[in-house]
Structure formats: structure tokens, C-alpha cells
Amino acid sequence: MNFINEGSKSLNVKNKKEDVKIVAFLCNWCSYAGADAAGTSRLRQPEDIRIIRVPCSGRINPLFILKAFNLGADGVLVSGCHPNDCHYSEGNFYARRRLEVIKEFLPFIGIDKRRFSYQWVSASEAQKWQKVVINFVKIIKEING
Amino acid sequence: MVNILENKLKEKISSLIEELEIIIGYSESKAPLKINPVFIKTKEEIDRLIFNNLCVNNLATYSYYLSADTKGKIGIILKPCDVKSIIQLISEELLIKNKIKTIVIGCNGIIDYKKINKAVNYQKIISAKLDENNITVNTIDKSFNFKLKDFFAQKCYVCNIYDNPPYYDEFIENDLKLNLEKKKEYEDIEEFEKSGLEKIYKFWEEEFNNCIRCYACRNICPLEVCRDKCIAQLDEPHWQSHKINSSEGKFFQLIRIFHLAGRCTECGECERVCPANIELLKLMKKVNQIILKLFDYRPGLILDMKPPLLTFKNVEQNIKDEELI
Ligand code: SF4
Ligand code: SF4
């Protein structure tokens, strides 16, 4: 993970506006394929996102998200298959509960809730992926000010 | 003065000792304001048992490891709030119900000795004496007399099970009842949140400057049964450095919190033992407040109910997707 600032800075580091760092965890079966499709169909997207592929959104340990923030990420994005469409049938249902708890908890340690988002993007939703990325980057840049 | 409650307790234990391999209870400590846990195996030792407002420790902490190491049944003396930890462990299939005999004593509140330390200006306390409503504390050159009701633990001010434990094998009623002006649950959390992101961030940064990564908070928690495999101490994978600084301390604590989300019974032991006086309970309470709001669940009350993060519903009533499109 050498793409993030050196040294472990505290959570909620503010990078410069033009230099935001966003970590995205995408599930292999839906969102990663969706993002890939967005690439092959040459849909323009901001370059601030570093994608990490995971087998399933249910594989995402809250630790991953916190670690990303701890290493200086400005935002963390999680994306998986739509509910009911999980490749492993229920991984994203478990994930949804955990992710929501994290999201609600972040402000309590002083991190803006908007810095974290989880989305459902299927393999065929290349355009949705493009919009998600554009909007998320925009929000993060706004918060960084 | 004959202590009626302690006598009742000793009688009860005498009648049970034959069927139990070991009994965990409270005994006198040499240190003022403290008690010691005691592990009783024979009739002769029963006389060592005590019970009073200083019996702060949640003895459920010993249940998991001890039950793994003993063949027979274990008896544990618990306050009504401590029994929640046992319920939680059973509901998660970490404890076998028939291996534990829960001996619950009605409670009239426990003292938070950190509050007393503060009230005597952190002077060394050389002795202390309890009576029904007051506590006398002597430092080297002064004597203080405090009203008990101002010095109870946070959780006592919101407790509604002190004479009505959610689960027990044996219940010993206490003639003294908890008599406190109740506080609103989570009112302190809501107050804290009003200070805004920036201040909150600073607050925790400073709190965790003091964390020395002693792992006392982890080791005392009755629900943290993963100590042997703790991710904070593994070198492979090396998720966390052993450095001591605010950011690592906070990171460790956040891992703890998420391992306890929907499980923590707010017993307050982690905060009590933290040598750095970090307000850990605040964090735990916030997670519980979220869990309550999202899943309408309170840990430690129902024996056969899975914690909310170990299950799911296809349609989640209280979770709304926030689409970024
Ligand atoms: S008990 Fe306190 S100092 Fe020790 S690891 Fe836990 S938070 Fe840090
Ligand atoms: S996290 Fe703290 S308050 Fe919660 S059960 Fe463990 S020791 Fe008790």
C-alpha cells in the first residue's frame, strides 16, 4: 500500500484539494467488473481512486476501512453487488450491516461521514460506476476545501 | 455489625459447593477501596467471600477461559449487570450454559473509585470505610466523608435490572435497593456529539496520546475471547505497528470497538482498568446506541438471540442506501 503518504498520519488527514487520495474496495463479481467495463468503454473518470479488488463486499473487514483512513486516505469507497445479487448469495447482506455501523460511527471520532460511502454497482452498470466516482471525488474535494 | 447479605451468600454457596468445581467470588483486598477476586474450591474458604459496594469487578471475565480449563461446573458470583456478559457469551455459543452456575446478587450500586480518587485530589488513600449511605476515606493528613450516591459508576445511573436480573440460576435478594436519580440513557453521548467534528477529533487525539498499548482494556473484557490471536499483536500479517502514539492507539481501539459492536454490555471494565484513564466507555456506548437504532437490539439480554452483526435481513428497515448518482 505504498501509494499512500509515507508514515502513518492520524486519521482524517487533509491532503491538498488537487491531490486527494481515495481508496475503493470493489467486489470481484459485480463492481470490479463494472469499473472494468467503464474503463473499456472509455468512460472518463477522475484519477484519484485507487481500487483494491476483494472477493466479496462481505470480505471487507472494518479494519480495512479504518486502516485506509489511518494511512491518510481522504475518502473510502466500498462497492459491491446489489442486495439479492451477491455471487455468494448473502455476503453483501452481512456487509451492509457492518458498513452502516461504520458510517454512523465515524463522526464520533471526528471524521466527516461523507468521507465514507458504500454503493451497489453491478457488472453491467459501467455508467453508474462513472457517476459514483465522479460524485464521490467531488464530495471529497469539497470537504477538503 | 452482622452482614445479612454476606451471610445469605455464604449459606447459598455452602449448599452449592459440592456440585461445583470452583466458585469465583469477591474477597477483601489489602488495598483500600479495592476488592480481590477469589477462587474457592473448599468449604473452609467460603468465609473469605464478601459482597459490598466496592465489588466492582465483573467476574464474568473469568468464565470463558476457566470453563475451557475445567471439567466440572463453575459457579460465578455476579451482579445483575454482570450476568449480561454471561448471556452474551452463551448466545454466541462461546459458553456452554450447563457448565456455568450463575449466582446473582441483588445490587444497590457500585462505587467508581476513580471518582473518589479525583475527589481527594489524587492524594494517596490509606484507608476507607463503607456504611449504608456513606463512605469515609482517609488520606495521610485528611479524612473525607462522601455520600455514596454521588460516587456510583456511570452504569448504575441508568440501571433498571439491579433487583431483577435478566438471567440467573440462583438469585440472592438484597434488602438494600439502588436508590438513585435516573439519568437518560446516552444523554452524555448526545451532549458530547454537540461539540462538533473538529473538537471531537482533537479530543480523541489527545486521549489516545496517553494510550500505552498495555492491552488491559482487551484483557479485562469478558467478551474478548480472542486474546491469543489478537490482530494487534500479530506480526504476520502486520496490520498494526507496535509504536506507541495517538494514531496507533486509536486504531487499536477502533478494532476493539468493531469486534464488540452489538456485543458490548457496557459493563465498564475496560474504562475502569485503563491506566491512562481514557474514556473508552464513551466509544462503546456510541456503538451500542447505533446498534440499538439500526437493529433494535441490546446486547446481553436474550439467551438465544444472535448479535445483529452475525446475521442479516433481506430488507433492512432502518438502513437507507445513499446513492451517489
Ligand atoms: S487499557 Fe488504556 S492504555 Fe491500555 S491499551 Fe487499552 S486504551 Fe491503551
Ligand atoms: S468493551 Fe468494556 S464495557 Fe464493553 S463488555 Fe468489554 S469491558 Fe465491558
Image (tube, coloured by chain):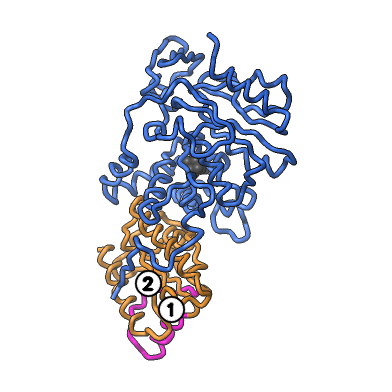
Chain colours: A orange, B blue
Q: Which residues are magenta?
A: A30-53
Q: What residue is rendered at 41% in x and 90% in y?
A: A40
Q: Quadrant of residue A30?
A: bottom left
In the displayed structure, B24 sits above or below B212; it is above
The amino acid pointed to by label 2 is Gln
User: Residue B78 placed where, x, y %?
Assistant: 55, 32
Q: Residues within 10 Å of mark 1 (few under 14, many from 20)?
A: many
**Is the CB of mark 2 within 8 Å of ligand 2?**
no
The amino acid pointed to by label 1 is Ser
In the displayed structure, B274 sits above or below A52; it is above
Residue hosting label 1: A31
Instruction: Please report, as a chain letter, where disc 1 is located.
Output: A
Of the two numbered discs 2 and 1 on the same chain, state the one appearing first in sequence: 1
Front position in the image: B271 or B28: B28
In the displayed structure, A42 sits above or below B287; it is below
Q: Are marks 2 and 1 in contact (CB under 8 Å)?
A: yes
User: Residue A97 placed where, x, y %?
Assistant: 43, 62
Which secondary structure, mark 2?
A: strand
Q: Residues within 10 Å of mark 2 (few under 14, many from 20)?
A: many
Residue hosting label 2: A119
Q: What residue is rendered at 40% in x and 57% in y?
A: A101
- What separation in Å lies between label 2 and label 1 (alpha carbons)? 9 Å
Q: Is residue B164 visible?
A: yes
* Residue B149 as seen in the image, left or right of residue B73: left
**Is A51 one of the magenta-colored residues?**
yes
